């Protein structure tokens, strides 16, 4: 399945493609990810919401394992 790569706007008004967005989110803390999630919901940016939730769960799982 081919994924369409289009820019997604973050809470800091950055327009990032999927790879850059994943890289950006991976550097954020859990608290910062929650802020990003709040922004995605307020702006009805469902693509960002899904990506942020996935990153949050990934980081939370890693945190729980350590």
Image (cartoon, helix red, strand yellow):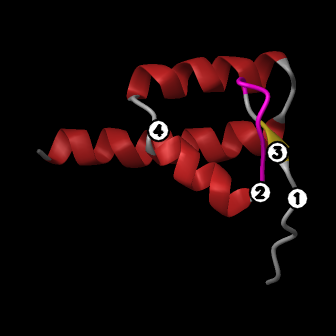
N-term mark: 1 or 4: 1
Q: How far apart are marks 2 and 3 (CA)?
A: 6 Å
Q: Is residue 22 left or right of residue 15?
A: left
Residue extending furthest toward the bottom = 1
Q: How far apart are marks 1 and 4 (CA)?
A: 21 Å
Q: Which residue is drawn at 87% across and 69% down?
A: 4
Q: Mark 1 points at which residue?
A: 6
Frontmost of labels 1 and 4 is 1
N-term mark: 4 or 2: 2
Q: What element carries label 1?
A: loop
Q: Residue at x 76, y 36 (%)?
A: 14
Q: Name the residue under label 2.
A: 17
Magenta-highlighted residues: 11-16
Residues at circles 2 and 3 in contact by the CB criterion of under 8 Å? yes
Q: Name the residue under label 4.
A: 56
Q: Name the residue under label 3.
A: 8
N-term mark: 3 or 4: 3
Residues at circles 4 and 2 in contact by the CB criterion of under 8 Å? no
Residues at circles 1 and 2 in contact by the CB criterion of under 8 Å? yes
């Amino acid at each position: 399945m081919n994924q369409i790569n289009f820019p997604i706007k973050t809470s800091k008004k950055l327009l990032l493609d999927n790879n850059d967005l994943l890289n950006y989110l991976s550097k954020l803390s859990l608290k910062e990810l929650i802020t990003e999630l709040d922004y995605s919901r307020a702006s009805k940016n469902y693509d960002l919401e899904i990506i942020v939730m996935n990153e949050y769960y990934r980081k939370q799982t890693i945190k729980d394992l350590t």
